[in-house]
């Protein structure tokens, strides 16, 4: 099963890279850009066909390794 | 006193620390990250560098390496652990120290000398700073912006777990001398039992007049006293 996980900084954590990207876009003329938050994306291939089990493993992977739960949030998508 | 310096792929301050330990007659061993048993040690040092190329998050992969279980056990049993720079980032990722180290506020790698105020001298690493509490040490990092929620910061301050803060040459702690955006100018913190210290500045780089100063020596002298 293929799983995608997106990791982003929590809303209350300052994201200087996102801020710079946002400002650059505005400088480029995209005046309707309100805000940009930068994150990380992971494609995970899992040898598990049971959706529930796969989701549980993915959650565990995210909590134990892919995110620092103090400052980051994650979302999981099963394909 | 016996020490172990843990070496990860990408560590680059390991030999500097070893030289410093040797200078103060601490019997040191280098321990490769792939080992599973920590040799008998009073002090474990996680050195600076770029362990595992800073992949995923700084210190993250190192915090899952084979030797780390024994390092955590050593710390939980009250053994001394000193994490310098990347070592501090690794300690944070293991959960032995609280909070996180974000990218420097201005997104620049910083390599320069900074002034530090020694905030807590009642721990085995800083005893000798009683005689000199404003010191100068080098920093060299990209992720040294210490961040924790208000409650955690309050706990660190109330329980005297902040070891060092960035200050000016007179010891004044203010925003203008905060190099990386750290909460409350924090440069180094201790755990509750004060046997684990994580710090961004590099004491091992100032242990000889030839290296332009000896403010780092005071830490190693404190350790051999303990």
Image (cartoon, rainbow, N blue to C red):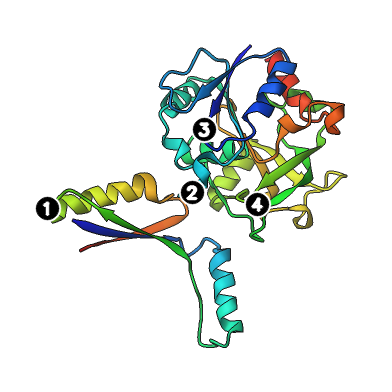
In the rendered image, residue B30, in percent from the top left (x then y), is placed at 56, 21
As helix, strand or loop, the secondary structure at mark 3 comes to loop
Q: Which residue is mark 1?
A: A50
* Residue drawn at the location 46% of the way across and 36% of the way down: B63
Instruction: Give how far apart the Cα atoms at labels 1 and 4 are.
Output: 45 Å
Q: Nearer the viewer, mark 1 or mark 3?
A: 3
> In the picture provided, is B63 more to the left or to the right than A44?
right
Q: Chain of mark 2?
A: B
Task: List the residue tagged with mark 4.
Answer: B182
Q: Residue A29, how many percent across, how many down?
A: 57, 88
CA distance separating discs 1 and 3: 37 Å
Quarter of the C terminus of chain A within the rendering: bottom left
Identify which residue is drawn at 59% across, 77% down. A24
Identify the residue under disc 3.
Answer: B8
Lower sequence index among marks 2 and 4: 2
Mark 3: give few (<14), some (14-19) or many (20+) Cα within 10 Å: many
- Determine contact: label 2, label 4, CB under 8 Å: no
Nearer the camera: disc 1 or disc 4: 1
Q: Residue at x 53, y 39 (%)?
A: B51
Label 2 and label 1 in one chain: no
Q: Residues within 10 Å of mark 1 (few under 14, many from 20)?
A: few
Look at the numbered disc 2 and give the secondary structure of its residue. Answer: loop
Distance (Cα) linking label 3 and label 2: 15 Å
View extreme (left): residue:
A50
Q: For the N terminus of chain A, which image quadrant?
A: bottom left
Residue occupied by mark 2: B57
Whether residue A79 sits left or right of residue B160 in the image: it is left
**Rendering coords of residue B27 (x, y %):** 64, 12
The span from disc 2 to disc 4 (Cα, nearest Å) is: 18 Å
């Amino acid at each position: 099963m293929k799983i995608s996980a997106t990791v982003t900084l929590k809303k209350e954590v300052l994201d200087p890279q996102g801020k710079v990207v946002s400002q650059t876009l505005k400088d480029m003329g995209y005046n309707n850009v309100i805000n940009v938050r930068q994150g990380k994306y992971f494609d995970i291939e899992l040898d598990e066909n049971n959706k529930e089990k796969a989701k549980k493993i993915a959650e565990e992977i995210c909590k134990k390794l892919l995110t620092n739960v103090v400052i980051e949030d994650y979302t999981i998508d099963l394909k | 006193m016996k020490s172990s310096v843990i070496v990860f792929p990408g560590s680059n301050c390991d030999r500097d620390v070893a030289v410093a330990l040797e200078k103060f007659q601490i019997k040191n061993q280098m321990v490769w990250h792939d080992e599973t048993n920590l040799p008998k040690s009073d002090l474990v040092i996680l050195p600076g560098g770029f362990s595992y190329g800073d992949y995923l998050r700084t210190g993250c992969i190192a915090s899952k390496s084979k030797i780390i279980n024994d390092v955590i056990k050593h710390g939980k049993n009250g053994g001394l652990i000193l994490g310098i720079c990347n070592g501090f980032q690794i300690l944070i990722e293991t959960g032995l120290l609280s909070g996180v180290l974000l990218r420097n506020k201005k997104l620049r790698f910083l390599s320069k000398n900074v002034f530090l105020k020694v905030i807590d001298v009642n721990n085995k690493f800083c005893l000798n700073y009683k005689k000199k509490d404003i010191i100068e040490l080098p920093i060299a990092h990209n992720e040294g912006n210490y961040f924790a929620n208000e409650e955690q910061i309050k706990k660190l301050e109330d329980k005297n777990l902040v070891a060092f803060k960035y200050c000016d040459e007179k010891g004044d702690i203010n925003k203008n001398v905060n190099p990386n955006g750290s909460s409350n100018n924090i440069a180094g913190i201790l755990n509750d039992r004060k046997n684990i210290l994580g710090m961004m500045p590099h004491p091992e780089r100032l242990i000889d007049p030839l290296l332009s100063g000896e403010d780092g020596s005071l830490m190693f002298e404190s350790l051999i006293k303990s």
